[in-house]
Image: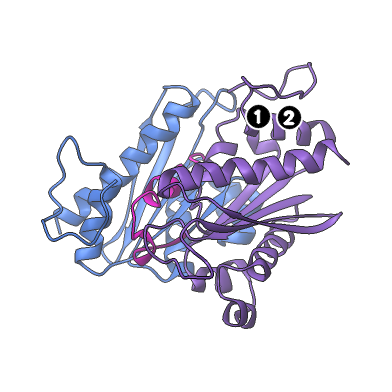
Chain colours: A blue, B purple
């Protein structure tokens, strides 16, 4: 993966890893990033920290795998978890906003979903995931159905989350 | 990666992924795990959460990439960071013990080091990493020099960290 201290623009092409493109864009804007991951379990942080120089931009993340961690460590209100369930738009939003505040960053991404193989329901089958992006602009949440199996689910969700941020950065 | 709900013992062999062996051992003892990662940047959490059923055992982790995150989110005392530097035995120990307390788990692993390519010093060259394991037994810290390049550094450190826990579990 290419380091951040180059001079060419952060174009991104088929050969360029999305984590490098996103960090390059953030670096150019002197903006920072934090993460709150549930179902991806650190996969996004892992990808982001593969980029040399990531520590200038990526301040950290919380892998809130249990509901207790979402509440106690991240600071999502228990009421939201109870009312909407951990895999919900409301919780994804709350996780992202809590992470942004806690780390004091410009952008935070949060994901909550069902990686499988178990844990699915009729209304939220295995592969369901909510991805939230928050920043000064506000907060957006996307719902996806990544029915790909556990490890591919994590990688696909990681790519979708970073793509949400990339689009926000190039369109604003 | 094999799921946790099988009946055979958690032997571990060349074909078995270490994250599956460790989670299988913890599952048999009904014990829980949390992580505090600096230089591995979520790589350990990512590996652990590849195992189906991991959520029963792995409650969560904190990727404390910045010193501020180590202090504010994880709860490492600023004095320890200042006196010893972020890459030190003392900070690895403090990170592990803070994570164990914060998540209320049986075992916590923490890593702090220099993934590179920059950031090395004469006494702590690129590749230096301190891995701490804490539990009811106390806390142990190992120092390694993984001069392998950034991505391989993360994978090698992940393996060493999980191996420390595996040995603790089979020898106690």
Other-residue count near label 1 (Cα within 10 Å), few / some / many at <14 / 14–19 / ≥20? many
Disc 1 and disc 2 in contact, CB within 8 angstroms: yes
**Which chain does the residue under circle 1 lie in?**
B
Q: Is residue A26 left or right of residue B167?
A: left
Q: Residue at x 64, y 78 (%)?
A: B80
Callout 2 secondary element: helix
Q: Residue at x 26, y 43 (%)?
A: A18
Callout 1 secondary element: helix
Position of the N terminus of chain B by quadrant: top right
Read off the residue under disc 2: B24
Read off the residue under disc 1: B20
| View extreme (front): residue | B122
Residue stretch in magenta = A39-60
Indicate whether B96 appears above or below B121: above
Q: Position of residue B83 (x, y in %)?
A: 61, 82
Q: Residue at x 43, y 36 (%)?
A: A129
């Amino acid at each position: 993966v290419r380091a951040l201290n180059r001079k060419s623009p952060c174009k991104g092409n088929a050969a360029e890893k999305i984590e490098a493109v996103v960090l390059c864009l953030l670096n150019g804007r002197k903006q920072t990033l934090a993460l709150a991951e549930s179902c991806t379990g650190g996969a996004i942080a892992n990808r982001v920290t593969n980029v040399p120089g990531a520590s200038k931009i990526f301040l950290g993340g919380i892998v809130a795998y249990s509901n207790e961690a979402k509440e106690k460590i991240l600071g999502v209100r228990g009421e939201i978890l109870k009312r909407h369930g951990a895999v919900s738009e409301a919780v994804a939003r709350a996780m992202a906003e809590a992470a942004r505040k806690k780390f004091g960053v410009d952008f935070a991404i949060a994901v909550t979903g069902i990686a499988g193989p178990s844990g699915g329901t009729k209304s939220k089958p295995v592969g369901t995931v909510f991805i939230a992006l928050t920043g000064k602009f506000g907060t957006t949440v996307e719902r996806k159905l990544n029915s790909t199996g556990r490890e591919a689910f994590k990688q696909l969700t990681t790519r979708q989350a970073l793509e949400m941020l990339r689009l926000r950065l190039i369109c604003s």
